Amino acid sequence: MINEIAHNKEKMRGALLAFEQMMKDNPASIPGDHPLLPIRNIFSNGVYVREIHIPAGMFVMGRIHRHEHPNILVQGSVIVLTEDGVKRLDAPLHMLSPAGTKRFLYTLTDTIWTTIHRCDATTQEEAEELCVTDNYEEIGMSYQEFNRLGGRQCHLVQ
């Protein structure tokens, strides 16, 4: 079914949100920051670096990113679902994510994923408020406006 809707970004958004709701409804889900998924936060001169360690065999739903930012898959292999469809990503890998990116991951191996954000936060809570949202409308423009103004796909650089 995912392959059938992969060419329609709005339907892919709906699929991502449906997966997220199924995860929230599952009593076995682990919400947010949890010792099983340790997060390391680094703050330095307007830069926020977030590193998460994810064991193999985990499903992880990311939040919607408000701004374009670099990502580094430091270690591991994952299957990822975004508005652009399904891809396998293998470390080491650097990529640029546009504003509005939301990912659903399945970790094939133990994984370390790092994101780098420009923001003046000094705590994880402040950084999350500035960098991510749970609502596509909060990224400041509708999906149609984003595409009309030249919204880019996620570029992978290996």
Image (cartoon, grey):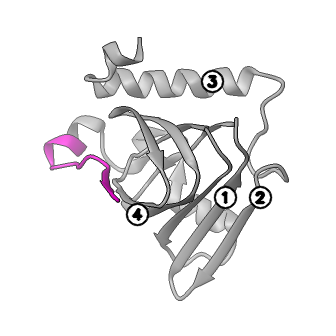
Instruction: Tell me the SS state at disc 1.
Output: strand
Number of the front mark, 1 or 3: 1
Marks 3/2 in contact by CB < 8 Å: the verdict is no
Instruction: Indicate the quadrant containing the N terminus: top left, top right, bottom left or bottom right.
Output: top left
Number of the front mark, 3 or 2: 2
Instruction: Tell me the SS state at disc 3.
Output: helix
Instruction: Tell me the SS state at disc 2.
Output: loop
Which numbered marker is on residue 52? 1
Marks 2/4 in contact by CB < 8 Å: the verdict is no
Number of the front mark, 2 or 4: 2
Give the CA distance from mark 2 to mark 4: 21 Å
Which numbered marker is on residue 38? 2
Q: Is residue 78 above or below residue 76?
A: above
- Expressed as whole percent of the image width and height from the top left, the position of residue 14 reads 44, 22
Q: Earlier in the sequence, mark 2 or mark 4?
A: 2
**Range shown magenta:** 146-158
Q: Residues within 10 Å of mark 1 (few under 14, many from 20)?
A: some
- Please tell me which residue is depicted at 30% across the width and 39% down the height of the picture: 142
Q: Nearer the viewer, residue 93 or 137?
A: 93
Residue position for label 3? 21
Residue position for label 4? 69
Q: Is residue 60 above or below residue 85?
A: below
